[in-house]
Amino acid sequence: MRIKPINAAMFQEDLPSRFRLQLLQVSFPAFDLPELTRRLRDHAAGRSEPPATADWSTVGRRLLEAPGGST
């Protein structure tokens, strides 16, 4: 993912510093395209799916130990 913040004061010096997002680019593997397309169509039709729980194993974050000693 790439985010490019822009400070409005860079283009008009009399403005206070104010940041906004100019570009938000998110890349997905090509094999995810059918599922992403399906979900976007469902969302546009008013059907959405509740978010799943986060799977931190794919980002290198250790799982937190749950109460009672299990993960």
Image: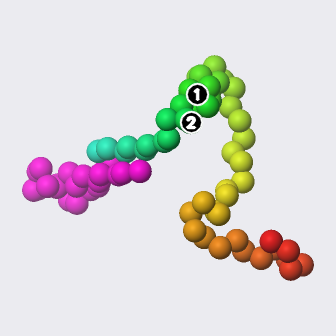
Question: What's the residue at 20%, 51% (across, down)?
Answer: 8
Q: Is 61 above or below relative to 28?
A: below
Can the viewer see residue 7 in this picture? Answer: yes
Horizontal arrangement in the rendering, residue 4 relative to residue 12 (left or right):
right
Residue type indicated by callout 2:
Asp
For label 1, the residue is 34
Q: Are marks 1 and 2 in contact (CB under 8 Å)?
A: yes
Where disc 2 sits, the SS reads: helix
Magenta span: 1-21
Residue type indicated by callout 1:
Pro
Question: What's the residue at 57%, 32% (across, down)?
Answer: 36
Question: What's the residue at 65%, 63% (across, down)?
Answer: 57
Spatial CA distance of label 1 from label 2 is: 6 Å
Outermost residue to the right: 68
Which disc is residue 54 wearing?
A: none
Q: Residues within 10 Å of mark 2 (few under 14, many from 20)?
A: few
For label 2, the residue is 32
User: Which quadrant is the C terminus positioned in?
Assistant: bottom right
